[in-house]
Image: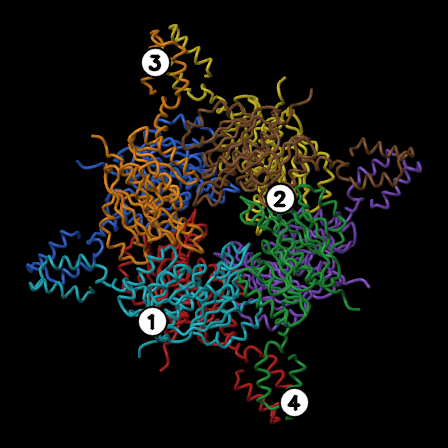
Chain colours: A orange, B blue, C brown, D yellow, E green, F purple, G cyan, H red
Amino acid sequence: MDKKELQNLLEQVAEGQVKPEAALLQIKTEPYKDMGFAKLDTHRGIRQGMAEVIYGAGKTKEQIVKIAQAMVEEKEKTVLITRMSKEAADYVGEFLDLHYDEISRTGMVGQIPKPDGVGKIVVATGGTSDMAVAEEAALTAEVYGNEVVRLYDVGVAGMHRLMDHIEEIMSARVIVAIAGMEGALASVIGGMADCPVIAVPTSVGYGANFGGLSALLSMLNSCASGVSVVNIDNGFGAGYLASMINHLEGRKE
Amino acid sequence: MDKKELQNLLEQVAEGQVKPEAALLQIKTEPYKDMGFAKLDTHRGIRQGMAEVIYGAGKTKEQIVKIAQAMVEEKEKTVLITRMSKEAADYVGEFLDLHYDEISRTGMVGQIPKPDGVGKIVVATGGTSDMAVAEEAALTAEVYGNEVVRLYDVGVAGMHRLMDHIEEIMSARVIVAIAGMEGALASVIGGMADCPVIAVPTSVGYGANFGGLSALLSMLNSCASGVSVVNIDNGFGAGYLASMINHLEGRKE
Amino acid sequence: MDKKELQNLLEQVAEGQVKPEAALLQIKTEPYKDMGFAKLDTHRGIRQGMAEVIYGAGKTKEQIVKIAQAMVEEKEKTVLITRMSKEAADYVGEFLDLHYDEISRTGMVGQIPKPDGVGKIVVATGGTSDMAVAEEAALTAEVYGNEVVRLYDVGVAGMHRLMDHIEEIMSARVIVAIAGMEGALASVIGGMADCPVIAVPTSVGYGANFGGLSALLSMLNSCASGVSVVNIDNGFGAGYLASMINHLEGRKE
Amino acid sequence: MDKKELQNLLEQVAEGQVKPEAALLQIKTEPYKDMGFAKLDTHRGIRQGMAEVIYGAGKTKEQIVKIAQAMVEEKEKTVLITRMSKEAADYVGEFLDLHYDEISRTGMVGQIPKPDGVGKIVVATGGTSDMAVAEEAALTAEVYGNEVVRLYDVGVAGMHRLMDHIEEIMSARVIVAIAGMEGALASVIGGMADCPVIAVPTSVGYGANFGGLSALLSMLNSCASGVSVVNIDNGFGAGYLASMINHLEGRKE
Amino acid sequence: MDKKELQNLLEQVAEGQVKPEAALLQIKTEPYKDMGFAKLDTHRGIRQGMAEVIYGAGKTKEQIVKIAQAMVEEKEKTVLITRMSKEAADYVGEFLDLHYDEISRTGMVGQIPKPDGVGKIVVATGGTSDMAVAEEAALTAEVYGNEVVRLYDVGVAGMHRLMDHIEEIMSARVIVAIAGMEGALASVIGGMADCPVIAVPTSVGYGANFGGLSALLSMLNSCASGVSVVNIDNGFGAGYLASMINHLEGRKE
Amino acid sequence: MDKKELQNLLEQVAEGQVKPEAALLQIKTEPYKDMGFAKLDTHRGIRQGMAEVIYGAGKTKEQIVKIAQAMVEEKEKTVLITRMSKEAADYVGEFLDLHYDEISRTGMVGQIPKPDGVGKIVVATGGTSDMAVAEEAALTAEVYGNEVVRLYDVGVAGMHRLMDHIEEIMSARVIVAIAGMEGALASVIGGMADCPVIAVPTSVGYGANFGGLSALLSMLNSCASGVSVVNIDNGFGAGYLASMINHLEGRKE
Amino acid sequence: MDKKELQNLLEQVAEGQVKPEAALLQIKTEPYKDMGFAKLDTHRGIRQGMAEVIYGAGKTKEQIVKIAQAMVEEKEKTVLITRMSKEAADYVGEFLDLHYDEISRTGMVGQIPKPDGVGKIVVATGGTSDMAVAEEAALTAEVYGNEVVRLYDVGVAGMHRLMDHIEEIMSARVIVAIAGMEGALASVIGGMADCPVIAVPTSVGYGANFGGLSALLSMLNSCASGVSVVNIDNGFGAGYLASMINHLEGRKE
Amino acid sequence: MDKKELQNLLEQVAEGQVKPEAALLQIKTEPYKDMGFAKLDTHRGIRQGMAEVIYGAGKTKEQIVKIAQAMVEEKEKTVLITRMSKEAADYVGEFLDLHYDEISRTGMVGQIPKPDGVGKIVVATGGTSDMAVAEEAALTAEVYGNEVVRLYDVGVAGMHRLMDHIEEIMSARVIVAIAGMEGALASVIGGMADCPVIAVPTSVGYGANFGGLSALLSMLNSCASGVSVVNIDNGFGAGYLASMINHLEGRKE
């Protein structure tokens, strides 16, 4: 209920078309959806009717099936299920037409929609071991309607590998830079590109990487401008934010 | 020197218009600027000719004057100097027409340009003590050509203060959420808004805030989607990234 | 042996009714229970004869049965067993009439007593994954004689979910706010409510949550007054303290 | 505006006594204060008209005077100013009748009100160096209308000192246990008392106390039930929460 | 080879009784054993011929058997094997007459010797879960010839339990205080006793105990004098050091 | 009041010599001092009448004078004042005959007593910068009646420096090993000596020493047996404990 | 393509021998390999044609076989596979002639080449449990053509063990010092030797070793010059760097 | 005294030329210098008679003068004084002919010797703020006889700056890579160069750099081989080690 609708309602009350009690109920029961909070209810979907996401970790396979079925039934939607075990995927597959990606442990019900973002999202990783996180980011972005360019294993220990892809990097609208260990990829890409770079530290590594802390701190301290950071291993968060940025429209003439 | 220019150059060599030695020199001395790296040289300015930034911390006042003068002389530019002490500002003021903001310890030479971003940038803070960081972000964004809406002291301990500004939050193109202590502001705003939220943890607080660690971890673990994080107290980085996002154009028809 | 009883005993000695040796033994063997320490012996039960708690972690199933049986035999008590594995519960169930809650891994022998606290305890969680800790808190509070209102999954990423329950929050006598990840729930509820808020950080999350550290620091740095914190995942401690506060009587006329 | 008031308003609209535009404005401009959020505006004062608190850290002496004057002018209130330097206190003293406590760096304008809490608040410290934090807690509690019993320097390295005060501890309604170094006081008092214990870790100590971390972790891991923790050195927060608990009324007959 | 022996050797060379070559060899081949380093070779045994210890963690069961057999064969010794799994114990039991303690995962071949220390060693724990570490300490002390008094589950949350044993504590020659969680036991005992207290933090607990860090920091910051600390869970180290102190002889008349 | 005294008292009550009321008061008011807790009152002095210590940090110079004067007046005692600034020392020197050591910032009123410990205490340091802590330890030990052998700057980077003193190390009764940076001294000395080694980590160093953390962790993880650790920079604690061990008498014939 | 080649190319264009299009392609497609980056492509092999390394962790056994076969087929090379499970080794063994070392979990296909380094590499460990890391370092060094001297279990708790090998230490060209727990070995060896010492902290230990942090900090703070550090447990990195140093040739006459 | 000398001495004793007492004294007083430990005494100087270093931090200006004078008097040496304040430098300058570098706070008495290393040492920094550490490294290397190539401000945020110097990097014998913030420089250089890279993390930065921790962890986790790390800000250590490596001679024919 926006300002206009509230005004209408009050005028209807004044005109006797709506009873005060009915108006009371209406204002009372939908206070948030109606007064500017409406978007909150749907804040998880950038575009209504397109995609829904289930965070699979900590949910039983039965719960996942139940939630996914509800989503699918409601509308013709693509449902993405992140952090889902192979076992859960097998179970879900008995009830729904699930495509499961073992590397990123991500499942999908429905079709990847036709990309409708403004530009391309580059998803780059330092090493092959970062692929699990990268695929979570890439699949998320695809499900939300983005064209994704994958640049895997372009870590800074071999700069030429990265430089072979300078063109993709320079023409991206937003880049997701994923790296474990020393996490230098974000800085190097941030120094090359002139678009927003979303850095994802991964827990890949051992010893003094302290579960991803080394890459996290490295990325937070990036000397390159335009770099921001999400949680360790948070491929979904990066893919979602990248999609959000990629769907930002330009000025209205 | 992009692909086309290189092709031209080579053709001029083939045609004898340019000597091999001259071509060699040209390719050699500007190898990066000319072969796709050109943007790298200017990666710190989103729009050529508009603004330059000097990171004042760790520089002597003499160094600041010298660098600022060089920038000013070169072109008609706005020069922003961050993390500059009052003492340095007084000194710089003797040589250049400096506007100094004591709260954020930021100086500016030249005019704030007319905003040319797509939308508005909201800079919100949890408390009044976060203002130093917030003004660094806001001034940076303004210097880079953005319209900035300041929402200060709208911390989550008094939700109504934040909700009084729901309209500004809902209509922002990008939001910079700045908070110390528990850093909850980023999550709450991230849950309300459907635009990118750049979270800036501040070192405001004491005891178990451990110099900003509490707000940093809080923001990295935000349960709201669309939130990414920059370094503790990094107002400049947030303002720069916000400007970058706010200047992203839509699709070309 | 309180002051009065000691006085009586000494008078009996003076009157020759009790021998010095017998008095010596009596004073000696119960020195603490009798001289003001009595409450210490029973400090774990707020109200004598009502409830007993066994911390199941690190105890064998045989030990749990043994302790529980001793408690049950002694009096008509409700016995709560926290942090008990399903396997242990099955074993205990062979000997005692055990109700086991798989989510919180809590078992109960006996009946939940009729609530006799002053008001209601609200147990709120940020997400569904915090339910294990929340149920430990809620069951503990119920076993100690409290009416519990459960508000689950009202995290700050969707403020309207929390606001739909503003009434319950405003009318609670004490609130247990449970959240992992960024732990912002405690601050937001603390800002809304005007009763004591017991914050419980949970280890729910991944990456930079560092096993609950993010929520812990966030809650300790809460900008809202009236908030205090217990150990990570310590549902029992929160439920116990909430019950203690809820049973505080008002002034005696 | 509660339910009743909204109903009245709507009825007035229906009856033509209030114009829809006026009703719109009223609902729009005070959405939170009127619909159950009213308490939020005053959540910082437990009892209206009694006390106001200014957090002095990070504020200039001029700001403090200005805020304090505004508070004093408004009503006959006691104004507490925490974390105020001696220098600021001297300055404030030129404008207002300020009582300044150098140990806790706390200032007060107005009178300490007559205690109206249900019972007594015990403020106990491990050592004399914890007194700064303790006085902040004690003065806060007194300003909010509580009788405070001070037990200073009763640390666990000399248990008899603490035990000499067993009576005060046993008869308190709520205890604030303040300690630096190993922070064991909270556990020992928590084991003795059967009322809520608010533990305040202090940064007192050196070396491996890591700025209060040792006491903080110690208190969070307390093996005694009924103990909760606030931020390091947060005397105000503990005093405020203690007052809140001490003012909880019993059941209404 | 001490000073005297070296002098003798040189004199024998001067007198022609020993050839220079033979002297050279003797000085060269035994430089450490002979010149004061001899004790180094046997520094792990306080008293020659009494006890040997094998640190079982990280050794295969075959290795343990081999080392233990070599030790047993050499002399009539008691061999203590710490941190040995049940499985390894079963295997070792096939070859040697092993007594295995499941709680502390400690095995012993041979007899516990008659105590020959000066006084008694008290081994006290905060809770029953600390028993594994306590038994490692106690058995180590016994194997090295000490009378051990066990005071288990005397944690500070119930001070009377500890005070019931004030006599044992006051008459100990050295005390090993073992506790997890908040580790307050060491400070309280340190405040009571006037003998050296060896504090052993344990990893018992959860959440913010961070694997024993809370107890470790607590003990290092103990406000009681005479307390020193060993590594987390290091029962052996504490038992060994306690034995060393308990075997210190008084002055020679 | 020990068992015998209590028995006497009760018999006096039985015989009518003492009134029950008087007995009640006596038992009630001195429960701890009389029943075995008496020693607690004097636990800070190893030997009555010998030495008193004032921890100067956080005390004003006036407070130090006052406490010191009270101690001196009471008996003929040596008073040690640790962590006292030069300024405070100058002030105290106006009132008392103070010997001040600038390196360790330790003051002493009265004479260093004749050593009466069983053996010698070796105080060894890794570098010259550790001398401040070392002198605090050495002076403490001397004030408590011990002969101290100082071995400074014998760090492990030059093993020969340490080995030149193998004799002192081998003949010590207890060793205080003080080192910053990597703290290896404790392990090396622990491997050489067969007496208790008290390790004191110091905050000497920079960068990744993190205020003494590196030396602290190093010493806690010492692979040498017989080593225990006190707080970072805690020279007093080490000297006190060393004295305690050095005054342990042998068995009574 | 170095300067000379580029000059030639341009001259060929000028002379019409090469078409501009062909030149463009050549400059464009090989910008890095040709302009000094060529070595980048082969930076992982110190000497072409000798050895290849596969980091086995995080790779499936099928992937390892595939990569190893490709390497073997290409040339007559020795292939080293680090961090490979026994299970993977068994599988790889079915396809290739693999020598597997269970201790370091390292496999090798092909022959260890004849050492061609300048001197000897000493690999020393503090304890036997550090052998896994040590063998990874030693085998790596051997595969890269170095003579390796193994000094295992020469930890500082028994200095004589280390000193028995003073000769090997003094004559090494580079030393790899591997230790867990307190990591003192690096400092002691660094103090003895006058060649570069590569320190490898290991995660061996428990409690306050925090997964290798204690040894890591210890080694970083080493008071001995000439010591540098690699990641925790990084035997490969140390062996590789040692080989690099050992193959540095002297000056060319 | 090496083997030969000892043999000679013993033969002289046998022949009566040297008295046993004199031989005893000689062996006794120089046990380490003579028996293989000789190098230990001079381990801090790579080449006798060339350079001496004084670590100025924590030393008084008087101490520095005294030590420097002793060094200068002894021989014709270059004396380097690191971490010396301007004030101390002024004082030392009154007594000795001191060259003081304000940026690195390093002083030098005597001449920089002619380089005699095998190759060149590259000292590279990420930013200009790292210059203090870089100059400490460079001056140290120069004082020890090395040719140093300085590449300052070649951080990874502008890759082209670094690539402009690819030639210097490729032809270095050893590289010192110095960077704060995210410390990525070490990895990028490590990936380019095929010589040893000594990484020096600096404390340059703010917020989540935690005093250099971010760069330290980043460098320890470097994905590039051939990289090792020294302590935060340890320019001297890096320069010393670089010199050591640069002076390693090749094989003797």
Q: Quadrant of residue C106?
A: top right
- Identify whether A147 is placed above or below C76: below
Q: Are marks 4 and 1 on the same chain?
A: no
Nearer the camera: disc 2 or disc 1 = 2
On residue E12, the disc is 4
Instruction: Check contact, mark 4 vs mark 2: CB within 8 A.
Output: no
Give the amino acid at mark 2: Glu
Residue A198 place in picture, x, y as percent: 33, 44
Instruction: Check contact, mark 4 vs mark 1: CB within 8 A.
Output: no
Q: Nearer the viewer, residue B180 or A177?
A: A177
- Residue that carries the numbered disc 1 in the rendered image: H119
Q: Is G221 situated left or right of H103 in this image?
A: right
CA distance separating discs 2 and 1: 73 Å
Name the residue located 83 percent from the left edge and 44 percent from the top edge.
F1
- Residue that carries the numbered disc 3 in the rendered image: A9
Q: Chain of mark 1?
A: H
CA distance separating discs 1 and 3: 86 Å
Nearer the camera: disc 4 or disc 2 = 2
Residue H167 place in picture, x, y as percent: 27, 64
Give the amino acid at mark 4: Gln
Q: Chain of mark 3?
A: A
Q: Are marks 1 and 3 on the same chain?
A: no
- Residue that carries the numbered disc 2 in the rendered image: C62
Give the amino acid at mark 1: Gly
Q: Is H86 situated left or right of D203 in this image?
A: left
Give the amino acid at mark 3: Leu
Nearer the camera: disc 2 or disc 3 = 2
CA distance separating discs 4 and 2: 74 Å
CA distance separating discs 4 and 1: 55 Å
Q: Nearer the viewer, residue H134 or A84?
A: A84
Residue F231 place in picture, x, y as percent: 60, 54
Secondary-structure class at tag 3:
helix
